[in-house]
Image (cartoon, rainbow, N blue to C red):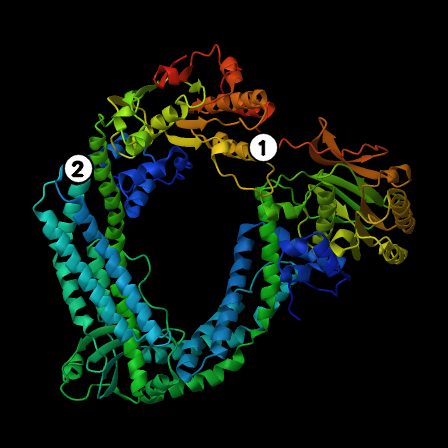
Amino acid sequence: MLSLLNLREPAGEIPASVFSDISLDKLLSGREIAVLSHICAPEDISARQEIFMLLENKPFYDWLHELYLNLKYLEKSKYLFENSSHEVERCALFCGYAESYVSAVESMKNSYKSKFLAALNGEAALRDTQLTRLKEGISEHKKLWGIISNNRLSISPNGVYVKFAADKAATVSDTVYRICERLGYVSTSDNKPAASKMSPRLADALIGLWRGEFRQMALLREELLPLINPDILRLTDDLEFYFSMNRLREKAAAKRVSVCYPEISEEPRYSARGLSDVSLILKDGSKIVPNDIEMAAGESAFFIRGANGGGKTTFVRAAAINLIMFLSGCPVYAKSAEISPFTRIITHFPENEGFSSGGRLENEVKRLREVVEAADAQCFMIFNETFTGADEQKGTALALELMNKVSEKGAFALFVTHFHGVCEGEIPSLVTVVSGGSERTFKIVKQVGGRSSYAQDILRKYGLDRESLMSKIKEAGNDQSAL
Amino acid sequence: MISLLYESDFRDKRDAVAHLDDLMLGKILAAVTPDIRLQNAAREVLERPLTDPAQVEYRREIVRDFAARKMSVERLSALFGGFGDIRSDYNDEKSRLFRLFGGRADSSELLGAAAGAVQKLIELINEIYDILRGRTPKSKGLNALKERITELSESQDLRYLYNLAVKFHGFSSAENTTETELIIDQSGKISGLGLISTQKSERAQKRAFGRKSEPEGGRAALFPEEAGGIISASAKELCEAFEFVISSLCGEFLRLNYDLNFYTFAVKYCDALKNAGVPAVYADLGDDTDIRGLYDLYLLMTLPEPEAVVANDFRLSNEVKGMLITGKNSSGKTVYLRAAAMALIFTAAGLPIPAKAAEIALPEEILLQMASAERAYHGGDITGRFEEEVIDIKQIADGAAPGALVVLNEVFQTTDYTEGAEGLYYILELLNRKGAKWVLVTHLKRLEKLFEGDKRVIKLRADENKDYRVLID
């Protein structure tokens, strides 16, 4: 089957809950999520990365975009042709349909060596003979259509007369618009009403007047239609995915966010320098602070701790989104990265699931134990404030038990928590960095210990305090002597 | 497009000055005229103070023309109001036809209505032309208007359009032979369906095709209703063309009715100043503000004895950073502030002010903030008056542009006075650094201390024992 996305069966599937936990479902379309939810086999990751890298090259981008536009046009003209309501419409729409098919197939031809693109080229070559006959047929059809496309009607109480009108007479409304223009009123629209559907009765009247031409067009269509094979339309969705992900890469580049195509690691590993949360690019306007992540066998589980609003959730979201991107062969938002081909991603964001209220803790513990029991080195998990239904002591114990098990299994996990007691255990922590007392840097660093809570959240709400105003006055660029 | 409020195509895109009613603008307008339309027109103009002296002069010339009774502003305003009436009559008729035919009006009838409206609009232009023809206004604005109306009224094109409108006013698809162009596009739809001619005569159809007998091509077997549908679609296209004429003519001239409402107000305002028996001047527009013998408009317009109103001087030179006005309650501080703010706002609208002599530097923008105690603050998730005031002041501090004038009345008095004064001090400094000036009425004594040595801040004191005069402290 012709595809630009898959050479092999997917290596795994990411549950929909993961996308909603990391809010990616609100930022990307359903189609994009559908592609991202299928984890690629390593060969497909490389083949897709190859296409994404080529898309950064303008001639390649232009060619692929033209192919996409031609396919979209084919899709539209096919729909219109198949839904035509009478013979006049069918005749009119056939040429557009056939021509758009010819253009789409011709634009599939290319000289790139990528496995996906070579397949496209082969498919186009197979259809060459049919295209030659199609082009001749289209030309014959157009000549016949030209005869009947311009008419003039005279309508009186005695009847309706139709004749072909070679000349273009000025309509009264044309005259009115011309006068308006001379008086200084220029219309910004084209002043023409939207095209309206022709009634079957009028179509029959026209067919009756040009019977021979319509018959010849019908015969031509009968011969040419079997030469059109619209199965190439399935490429449209594949191309949309590439362009949409490429647009995201361009947005990131415009915001100076680094992008890379990670190495596929043979050992279990998630290593990235300068990893960014791409969802902030989509939300626009947010300050993006890149962070590093280094997880490998032996140190594959981390607690994430630190100040509210300090960037804990953003960090785990960045880790999750970029992992999903990597596993779909998409650009990853980091300076450099090396990641192993995980086959499972699991997230647990209890607040979204209503786990925060008491009474369900036992179920939650039971379910998570099962999940971790089945985990292995190809499994990546994220827990966000899990066990908040428990008191601090119990919650800490449960969190440590869970993460110790994860570590024992060799699985990978990040666990965002406010339980400070977890730093007493063996599992290392990544903590948010706060400087100058309360200023968030959104940087995450590896730390052992560190129980400070940063509970106080000082907000200089409106920036009208002395310090803020002094700095604004400084910005205004005048001397400070008066102050 | 001609405007009587702005020379050339200038349009002020800034936000309207807020809180003018805290300075009794509404009551001043109501005292000048009870007509709400005129009050609204004046308010709209006053809330957008001009910054360009040339634009101010453009309006002043027009005010002078009308005040000197060069032509009747009321009559002209009523005639320009006719554009709106004709358009709304047409819209009413259109709605009626749609209602009558269950949401699908007959286009032939609509065409008749649109043509009728065009006919009336052209007649209205000719009527305005008759009024303006004999007049010799001095202002650029009224002369430009006269020129445009003359150009239209005397043009052959408008006459041709008038004749077309008359012809289609009586259009009837049942009696006429209509020739229509029909183009089938690449999607098999009818893309061009335009009315080429229509004749009442029975032989017209033959003439349209240039033959005496049956035309070349052939007779199409169409139901009468289908033929009617084709005529209706052609009529719709022409109807849209006539609607374009309606919207173009109304678009150009309807706005003038609002402009003229402002000038009708202006003439009444000049009369009211005259009746109050105080001197009135058009301020010289310069780099400094120096107003001598300034009266408070609100008191002047509303007190039964306007002669009891006290005049004060107001001076805010180019070098001054701001003005601090203090004094006891009811000593005349707010009246003074109001008189000065209104003088600036009325001058920036192109109107005279009640003063003996005046030079005014037009501010780039005027920002007002009255005491929270005098304003109706709304509840919600904000905790209190002071916080709401802070939000308003923050907007002013963030948005103030170079050349702005910030008028503040008893702000930051809903918190501890010392804290309020210190908070305000740095805000005022920030405003200065941004190139704005400020005028502040306050009870915050600490502010006087903070500005003690600053010669560029004028300190004034209002005193009821000194005849409500506001003098240098």
Residue B46, image quadrant: top left
**Residue at horizontal 47 percent and vertical 77 percent from the top:** A81
The answer to which of B60 and B267 lies nearer the viewer is B267
**Residue at horizontal 55 percent and vertical 54 percent from the top:** A61
The answer to which of B350 and B75 lies nearer the viewer is B75
In the picture, the disc for residue A462 is 1
- Where does residue B209 sit, x and y in percent of width and height? 18, 81
Instruction: Count neighbours of disc 2 (C-alpha within 10 A) and say few if under 14, some if 14 to 19, many if 20 or more.
Output: many
Residue B135, image quadrant: top left
* Lateral position of residue A14 relative to residue B396, left or right: right
Q: Between marks 1 and 2, how big is the CA–CA gap? A: 49 Å
In the picture, the disc for residue B283 is none
* Lateral position of residue A284 relative to residue B51, left or right: right
* Label 1 element class: loop
The answer to which of A187 and A395 lies nearer the viewer is A395
Residue B296: in sight, yes or no? yes
Q: What residue is disc 2 on?
A: B67
- Where does residue A127 sit, x and y in percent of width and height? 56, 73
* Lateral position of residue A16 relative to residue B81, left or right: right
Q: Quadrant of the C terminus of chain B?
A: top left
Give the farthest residue toward the top.
Answer: B453
Q: Are marks 1 and 2 on the same chain?
A: no
Does A295 sit above or below residue B173?
above
Disc 1 or disc 2, which is closer to the eye?
2
Does B408 sit above or below residue A404?
above
- Where does residue A166 sit, x and y in percent of width and height? 25, 75
Instruction: Count neighbours of disc 1 (C-alpha within 10 A) and say few if under 14, some if 14 to 19, many if 20 or more.
Output: few
- Where does residue B74 sit, x and y in percent of width and height? 19, 47
For the residue marked with disc 2, what is the amino acid?
A: Ala
Give the farthest residue toward the front.
Answer: B304
